[in-house]
Amino acid sequence: MKSFLPRIEIVLSQIRDNTRLLCELYGKQGISLMGVSKAVLGEPSVIEAMLQGGVKFIADSRIENIQKMRNAGISTQFVLLRTPLSQAESVVRNADISFNTEIETLRKLSYFAKVQNKQHQIVIMVEMGDLREGVMLCDLFQFIRKTLTLSHLKIVGIGCNLACYGGVKPDGKNMHALSELVDRIEKEFQLSLEIVSGGNSANYEWYKSTLNVGNINNLRLGESIFLGCETVNRKAIPGLHTRAFQLVAEVIESKKKPSLPFGEICQDAFGNIPNFQDRGVRQRAIVALGRQDVLVSGLQAENKLEILGASSDHIILDSRNYNLKIGDEVNFNLDYGSLLAAMTSPFIQKQFVSCNRSAIAA
């Protein structure tokens, strides 16, 4: 099989293992998982691995990814995590459940649900401090009252988002507050909330430290499944694979060069005025990968290679006198931002491998 460059190598068995272990871990206290597919653009093979591992839902922020998965024959409950008003018709057609915070959007969803002779399920997102999406607590009960007047919608749950925009940590206080809110809503409106989605991959520390998860019965996981870590401190979760994805690029130049540029320094291609440390003459290599392809700050090169910087199309490495030759391959570990960008890039080939690449957190 021909290997394309640059490429991202994906080990499906490790994704399946991570999903299974996380489903078992959280399932001990009755928490189901939504496998978040946005980082892999709804790649059907990856989604099948997550479903085989035991996730109950597949969640994505792009309706286009959900359409892609449906067209590939994926059979599951699809959840849309972001609901643009302009895509309401497509949301009702393709998503079983959507997360919502705006009455105007809900009216549109109800209208198209009526047109399509459906009942669309919704989860209301509540603002718990991170200040991304969510209905403010002071407005929540009036919001629910208005929602209940919309004939073709069914409220199936509430949720919150933390440790994303504002970096607010999921902890006992905000999880308890969300759990108590469920009791109040169910009592006030005679509802049974099937889904109480307490957060994402950042909830690991809270889960491990709490004695009682309360009414929280769902989490939305992407990074923990794909990269084997939690997202409060980016620590590896014991027993999970941390190298299910590897980025591979080709060396296109390898030379000894001075470490200081020579000539008058001005702005670089991205409007920055760079600073350099004089390390003398060093062995440097360039790989055919750049900022147009990937979030370079989230990459870590293997073999002790140091990333010095990047332009749109090139990453410059200090190869520490490692004898890289033209055509050699350099492997990179990725963080979540880099994975998201690399999977989105049309210039990076996606290749499924069944190697014994092993990095399991103890």
Image (spheres, rainbow, N blue to C red):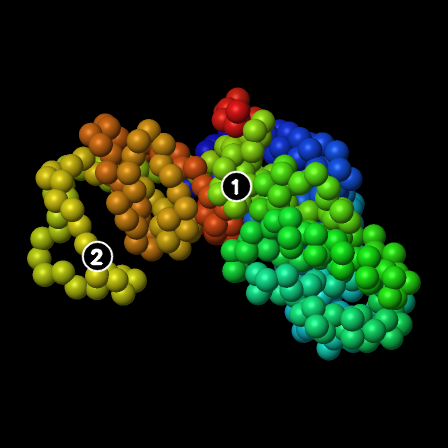
| Tag of residue 119 | none
Report x, y in % for residue 121.
82, 61
100 relative to 153 in the view: left or right: left
Disc 1, SS? strand
Q: Earlier in the sequence, mark 2 or mark 1?
A: 2
Question: Residue at coordinates 36% horizontally, 36% vertically from top-left?
Answer: 301
Report x, y in % for residue 292.
40, 55
When asked about the image quadrant of residue 186, the answer is bottom right
Nearer to me, 2 or 246: 246
Do we see residue 94 in this rendering? no
Is disc 2 surrounded by few (<14), some (14 to 19) or many (20+) residues within 10 Å? few
Which tag is nearer the camera, tag 2 or tag 1? 2
* Residue type highlighted by circle 2: Pro
Residue annotated with mark 2: 274
Question: Residue at coordinates 71% horizontally, 56% vertically from top-left?
Answer: 178
Disc 2, SS? loop
Give me the C-alpha separation between circle 2 and circle 1: 33 Å
Q: Say if 84 sits above or below 53 in the image.
A: below
* Residue type highlighted by circle 1: Lys
242 relative to 176 in the view: left or right: left
236 relative to 293 in the view: left or right: right
Residue annotated with mark 1: 350
Q: Say if 186 sits above or below 50 in the image.
A: below
